Amino acid sequence: MADLLNIGVLVSGSGSNLQSIIDNIENKSLPAEIKAVISNRPDAYAITRAKKHGLPWNILEHDNFQNREEFDQELIRILKTSNVELVVLAGFMRLLTPVFLNAFPQRIVNIHPALLPSFPGIHAQKKALDYGVKFSGCTVHFIDEGIDSGPIIIQSVVPVHDDDTEDTLAARILQEEHRIYPLAIKYYAEGRIDIQGRKVRIKDAR
Ligand code: GAR
């Protein structure tokens, strides 16, 4: 069997994407090992999930740091000490500084609940509803200096229904998130991702 990819998962909330990654690892669909789960919020349910599965976890409250750079330095320290090769942002609601990006060049991925480049930033599902789009979805992408602007790895589309609320649309999108995030990490673990400028090619993807 191929080597397992060491990943670190950064979270701020419920952690349902973390759960889908854990499930895919446990059922052997994803050749990865979670070396660290780090939350910037002490009350994140994601941490309860990490504990349940015996995963190493940390809480880093950003209020305890002088500035963003110091917070990022501590994140880097934990991730490097844990031998993390790929940083996975899973509902991590905090902007990272260039200090962090430079520590893991082209090795940070994020999932966003919209079809980028539409509706970056927070409240993406509400923005899609308010705009009146007929389809939305989710995007797994690499992180760069911008907000949700890095090269796109995988997207998945869902319909928007006339009677959708923010919650019903978010739930429909989340189902797809749970499918494509582990898949994107799997492609990375298998060494099948090639980044050329903005374009990401996945070798032998159908
Ligand atoms: C997910 O919908 C994710 O796409 C979104 O937060 C939710 C986290 O859910 N992320 C962002 O909006 C990042 N800008 P989870 O904690 O249950 O995985």
Image: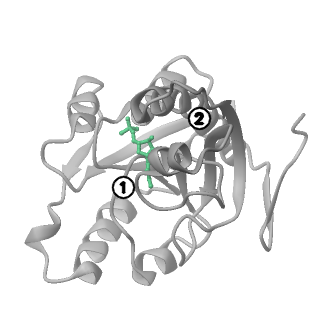
Secondary element type, mark 1: loop
Marks 1 and 2 in Cβ contact (< 8 Å)? no
Q: Nearer the viewer, residue 141 or 9?
A: 141
Please report the residue visible at 22 percent of the width from the left and 38 percent of the height from the top.
47
Q: Nearer the viewer, residue 148 or 65?
A: 148
Q: Nearer the viewer, residue 10 or 148?
A: 148
The amino acid beneath tag 1 is Ser
Secondary element type, mark 2: helix
**Side (left or right) of 166 relative to 29:** left
Q: How is the image coloured?
A: one colour
* Quadrant, the C terminus: top right
The residue labelled by disc 1 is 82
Tag in front: 1 or 2 = 2
Percent x, y for residue 180?
A: 64, 35
| Res. 182 mark | 2
| Quadrant hosting residue 43 | top left
The amino acid beneath tag 2 is Pro
Q: Is residue 91 above or below residue 19?
A: below
Percent x, y for residue 69?
A: 29, 82
Give the tally of numbered discs. 2
Label 1 residue near ligand 1, CB within 8 Å: no
Query: Real-space Cα distance between discs 1 and 2?
Result: 20 Å
Percent x, y for residue 141?
A: 63, 56
